Amino acid sequence: MKIMTHDKLEELTKKEYKYGFHTDIESDSFGKGLTEDTIRLISEKKKEPEFLLEWRLRAFEHWKTLSEPTWQYVKFKPVDYQDIVYYSAPKSQKDGPKSLDEVDPELRKMFDKLGISLHEQQRLSGVAVDAVVDSVSVATTFKEKLADVGVIFCSFSEAVKHHPELIKKYLGTVVPYTDNFFAALNSAVFSDGSFVYIPKGVRCPMELSTYFRINAAETGQFERTLIVAEEGSYVSYLEGCTAPMRDENQLHAAVVELVALDRAEIKYSTVQNWYPGDENGKGGIYNFVTKRGKCKGFASKISWTQVETGSAITWKYPSVILQGDNSVGEFYSVALTNNCQQADTGTKMIHLGKNTRSTILSKGISAGRGQNAYRGLVKIQKNATGARNYTQCDSLLLGDKCGAHTFPYIEAKNKTAKVEHEATTSKISDAQIFYCKQRGISEEDAVSMIVNGFCKDVFQKLPMEFAVEAQALLGVSLEGAVG
Amino acid sequence: MIASVQNKTPFSDAFRAGREQLPGEAWMRALRDSAIGNFEEQGIPTRKDEEWRYLDLKSMGKTQYRSPSAKPQVDEALAKAYFLDGTLARFCFVDGRYDANLSQVDDLPAGVELLSVAEAMSKNESELKNALEDSAVDSSHPFVALNTAFLRDGYVLCLKKGVQLEKPVQILFVGSQALENCAEHPRHFLFLAEEAKAEVIECYVSPNAGNFLNNVVSEIALEKGARLSLCRVQSEGSACSHLNYSKVNVGQSAHFESKVFSFGAKTSRNEIEIQLSGTHAFCSLEGLYIGGGDQCLDNRTVIDHQVSDGTSREFYKGILGGKARGAFSGKILVEEGAQRTDSEQNNRNLLLSDDAEADSKPQLEIYADDVKCSHGATVGQLDEDQIFYLRARGIGEAQARSLLTAAFAMDLVDSVGNENIRAFLENQVSEKLSQEVGQ
């Protein structure tokens, strides 16, 4: 049985990255390198107001004083920040498409290949897609329908143009540029991203969604997303990614900020399937992302759900600051590492308000030589009376060359706090496989079933459209690692 | 002579001033010199160091520590209050130096060697030299380096193959008022050869002492099939710093049990690093830390499963009142190839006051797939339903709380096999609890 498993593993790990192709679009890029001039140029190119340029420059000044963090549980070759192209926009975008027909046919083809054709998305799922290719939004759909209820869903650049007061009010309030090395870098050079504003009392009529994709070679992508949910509003936001096959390591340092006011709820879901590098760890995306939400208002709620199957290195901690009394933070995560992938991911739940509650559910799957670490912090501050946290992180090991690590931190400063943490590590037992095979289920299907069962609690939290995709994705990613 | 000074520490002057008085031959001096250099290079850790993030050692940097007097004042009554009944032997230290009068080593059977490090330095010099030179303890640990630089006394317990002790050995460290602004650095060596068995209880008491540093380092090795049960009770004075570091090598099918009770000291840190180096090795680490006032009680454990079929159990409990801070950091490392490892780790904390703080950092680092590992950590307060249950039966609230708190603490005491030790621990725990909870 063991031998057969290894054969299968061999055969399946060789499966190629399904989304590895490169579309040739003329790019409007700067040269490599990062100086103050680069930042001025980005800002000028995007016709940004003065306050934003100043903010970028302050961030850049701060960034220069920082050095890369070293505490994380991932290893990679040092990144040469002067060897990155900081801005690249597809050329044909110049005048801005007004409808799908105006979208560059090359781009359309690319999305078709990825299976996220805008038509399909529109027609079948009713999901509005703000597709981001190489740092600039090329198509935004359903905008009018959203505008009817007052929801603003547009690219970050557009938001800067049309709603500068909102940007000025909320930009950097959750993740200040002083936060960390990569947040500072992003703040200085971010090229585009998405902006969502849900007005008071509005329940967003559809799931909002963007697809990020790194296209041109050697282009770092520095996305910035800002979601503001006003009092009593609700929004569910989906983010999914695939990237073409590249040999050079590519850096992705995004920042996501969420702000939830009184009784507002934000649900943020991610399926991340960037190029993980080949079986020997060559190439792949460096995914160093700062994601944080602030439950600013009373009884507000922020929920992160993520399925991380791609990237050579995933290094992110979607966090929630529970500032408002009775606010709720949630984190549901499935992280899978295969071959030479590394993941150091988790969350921080900072309880400041009274009766704040947080739930953390993390499922890590390691296969091949993958290293998968959960790192989390649950902090109960002195005034957070009645705060409650429940954390569960489970790891599943497939193969004897991989690693699964758990580094939770609990800091409680209030005696009424109730904090619980549980973690287990296990493997799929031969008995489980035998049980399934005995009932006519092939070994591969059995593993897929067991793993999907292992992740079920998290998948249930995903919006329908994503749940199906995520399960399929996990199946595909795991096929190479049955063990 | 001495390597150039990288960082001047409060220990540097004391070392240079007292270097000539420290015992040992040339090899020992060389060892001390390199160790102090090592310590100075690292400096006193700050809370920015990941491994020290819950312990504030700033005040240590402000004290100019001296060496304790060579002729300590012996408070016999105090020492006797901590004598355990039914022991095989008792080894007593006063202000860091071995005291033969208070000790009792007459009944040791053949095959057992129990002596002070000071004695070993003259009598068994070559053995001690070997032990220190290829020391298992890590010189990257600043306080181990500091201990090596200053080490003067401690105990050596060696059991020959197959020697099994029926009764426990007590090691008692008594500190007096004379320790004000002193630092002592006891070093212990425990070696159990194949199939040997021993039970040791170490007590550190200094109720009347002021600000001093007790920096204890132990090196423990268990050969195939050996069994050691080690219990430590730390009831130092409320102004002192107590640092205790142990490195334990557990061989094939050997069995190591540790129980650590931290009650005293202003700043206390208990570190145990275990290497399960033989197959089917077992270790169990238990700890109870009860703090009040402005105490900081830090615990750190590392269990390294190096080979297959190891089992480890870990259970630490904290009760924190006043402005006390309790911290637990436990790492379980399962190395590649350490298949069929079975490991459980648990940390529970009870917060009694609004200003107390509990920090917990349980960690799993696993590089093998056929393993069973779990860990859990909780922080909470007494269950109101349980209090209600007791009150409904006519028990006052204060008493109900102290009953439940005692119950929380006592299960670590209840599992002690030796009756005398158990009774002793019960006393210690209830005494400490009555101070913090008020019974």
Image (tube, coloured by chain):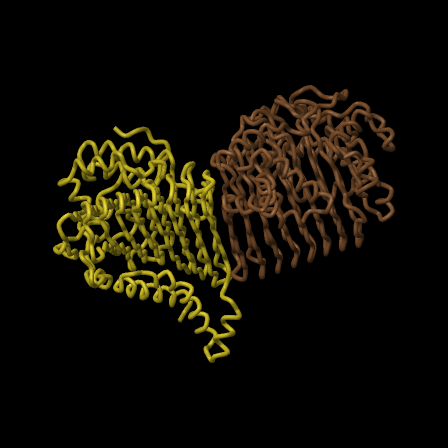
**Residue depicted at 21% across the width and 53% down the height:** B94
* Chain with brown colouring: A
Please state which of residues A181 and A480 is positioned toward the viewer in this rendering: A480
Pick the quarter of the image with the C terminus of chain B.
bottom left
Give x and y (percent) for residue B122.
Answer: 14, 40
The answer to whether residue A440 is left or right of residue B391 is right
Image quadrant in which the N terminus of chain B is located: top left
Q: Is residue A13 left or right of residue B161?
A: right
Q: Decide: is B146 above or below A284.
A: below
Residue A155, position in %: x, y? 78, 36
Q: Residue at x 72, y 26 (%)?
A: A40
Tell me residue B86's x, y (percent): 20, 62
Q: What residue do we see at 55% from left, 32% from top? A: A8
Where's residue B74, x and y in %? 19, 57
Whether A202 is drawn above or below A444: the answer is: below
Q: Is residue A151 visible?
A: yes
User: Which of the pair B137/B55 is nearer the observer?
Assistant: B137
The correct choice, above or below, for B2 with respect to B304 in the image is above
Colour seen for chain B = yellow
